[in-house]
Amino acid sequence: VWWGIFLGQNFLKLIGADGQVLHPGGILQVADGDQITAVALQVEVAAANKAFALWCHGGDGIATWGKPSRGSDSARAGLRQVRQVEAVDAAFAALLENGSVVSWGTEGSEEILAKDVTRILAARWLFLGLRADGSCTAFRTQRGV
């Protein structure tokens, strides 16, 4: 079923008449006349060169596709409480609700962790993390200068 793809990434939730949320792989008990509610979360997309990331604000997962060396690493589906995702030429950075930043993509690049970030910005090979106190921190991808 087409909606199974979105349930697996928590972009769509099905809720039974009793308020029970159907989890991927779960069974929702429905009797004749019961109503099922489908809740679609607002989906956002970030695009790198030959790779894409799809997520929901506050969601529990990021779906990626495209060229693996450009950031389409399906392991990113394990990220929780995603607030924002930005893309540069061959990498992505995700800002999580706890203020930490995780970056992935460029072949051989490592995850980059930062704390207390409120917003991220992206340029060709650079991510900039803005903090509430007005300071900022920069993250280069491996290809960056």
Image (cartoon, rainbow, N blue to C red):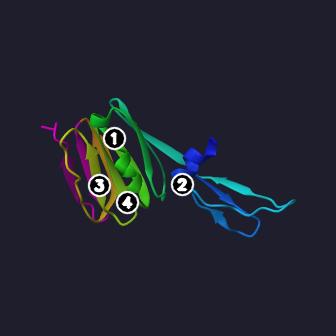
Q: In the rendered view of the protein, which quadrant contains the N terminus?
A: top right
Q: Residues within 10 Å of mark 2 (few under 14, many from 20)?
A: some
**Magenta part of the chain:** 125-145
Determine which residue is flagged by label 2: 10
Work out how far the residue at label 4 is from the one at label 1, CA to CA, in angstroms.
15 Å
Q: Nearer the viewer, mark 2 or mark 1?
A: 2
Q: How many marks?
A: 4
Q: Which is nearer the eye, 50 or 115? A: 50
Determine which residue is flagged by label 3: 102
Return the disc, 1 or 3, that comes first in the chain's sequence: 1
Q: Residue furthest right?
A: 33
Point out residue 68 in the picture as x, y percentages from the top left corner: 31, 36
The kind of residue on which mark 2 rests is Asn
Point out residue 55 in the picture as x, y percentages from the top left corner: 47, 48
Is residue 5 visible in this depiction of the protein?
A: yes
* Badge number at residue 87: 1
Work out how far the residue at label 4 is from the one at label 2, CA to CA, in angstroms.
16 Å
Work out how far the residue at label 3 is from the one at label 2, CA to CA, in angstroms.
20 Å
The answer to if 39 sits in the magenta stretch is no
> Does dot 1 land on a helix, a strand or a loop?
strand
Q: In the rendered view of the protein, which quadrant contains the C terminus?
A: top left
Q: Nearer the viewer, mark 4 or mark 2?
A: 2
Q: Residues within 10 Å of mark 4 (few under 14, many from 20)?
A: many
Work out how far the residue at label 2 is from the one at label 1, CA to CA, in angstroms.
21 Å
Residue 131 falls in which quadrant of the image? bottom left
